[in-house]
Image (cartoon, helix red, strand yellow):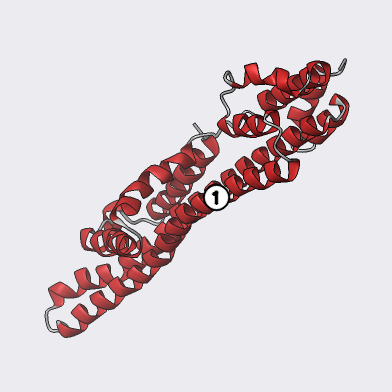
Amino acid sequence: MDLGSLIGIVGALAMMLLGVISGGSGLGTYADVPSFFIVVLGSWCCLMAATSLGSAVGIFKIMGLTFTVPNFGEKSIVAKLMAFSDKARREGLLALEEELEDLDDEFMKKGMRLVVDGTDAAIVRDLLEIEVSQMQDRHATTTGGLNMWAALAPGFGMLGTVIGLIAMMKNLEDKASVGPNMAVALITTLYGSMMANWLLTPIINKLRNNDAKEAQVKEMIIEGILSIQSGDNPRILRMKLLAYLSPPDRKEIEAEFKDT
């Protein structure tokens, strides 16, 4: 569980509710079913029209990823690449073939398979970088859907405001309807702003950060694989790989391989 996302989103909502309560208003004042239909469901239906039914339904699962901490296994990847490097220098690249089936990382397995098969280094890099690029394109499509929803929600909030104001102006003689229509007019704007700024924008940013981190780990794997193929000294390989790690992880790996 990503406590930063959970505390941040729940905490922001709590602060808004606290502000409402401390201002002397009841929470029921801000609960409005017509506004929910217009802003949340209306903008989601337009998102479906702009993308597809599957994308619009699946977007909730994507949003749920914000609350999980991605584990890209950087430290285990470094350890595995270091072990491959040592064995390749002692026994040759072909000696690595028997260990590839035990690899859990499919990206590393694909790259090491190319190296063991004697593929040219430039081709190995091109093939793996294409895979990274395609992965980022898929992630960008996902965040693009969320970004579109973040843009649609405030727009539907303004539509709801116009709808409420029109209804109010056409029924000014009916004083009982003025309050409900004005509530729809104002609360729809509130809901649209909340969706964009409280929920969707933070989620988009977190997913983009995770994408950048995953791409960085894959770039580390590419550099490690090519270093093994070129026969670099394990110390050189270690320096290359450690450059991709955070300082705490770097110190832990350095301590583990200080004698190599």
Query: At which x and y percent is residue 71?
Result: 57, 31
**196 to the left or right of 215:** left
How many numbered marks appear?
1
Res 202 visible: no
Where residue 80 appears, as percent x and y from the top left, is 70, 22
The residue at 60%/46% (across/down) is: 132
Within the image, what quadrant is residue 229 found in? top right
Q: Note whether residue 189 is visible.
A: yes
Which quadrant holds the C terminus? top right
Q: Position of residue 248 (x, y in %)?
A: 75, 29
Residue 229, compared with residue 154, is above or below; it is above
- Quadrant of the rendered structure where residue 10 is? top left
User: In the image, 130: left or right of 45?
Assistant: right
| Amino acid at pointer 1 | Gln
Q: Residues within 10 Å of mark 1 (few under 14, many from 20)?
A: few
Give whichever of 77, 232 is nearer the camera. Answer: 232
Dot 1 lies on which element?
Answer: helix
Q: Quadrant of residue 125?
A: top right
- Residue named by callout 1: 134
In terms of depth relative to the viewer, which is nearer, 130 or 250? Answer: 130
Q: Is residue 114 left or right of residue 260?
A: left
Kindly give the residue lying farthest to the front in the view shown: 118
Closer-to-camera residue (1/91): 91
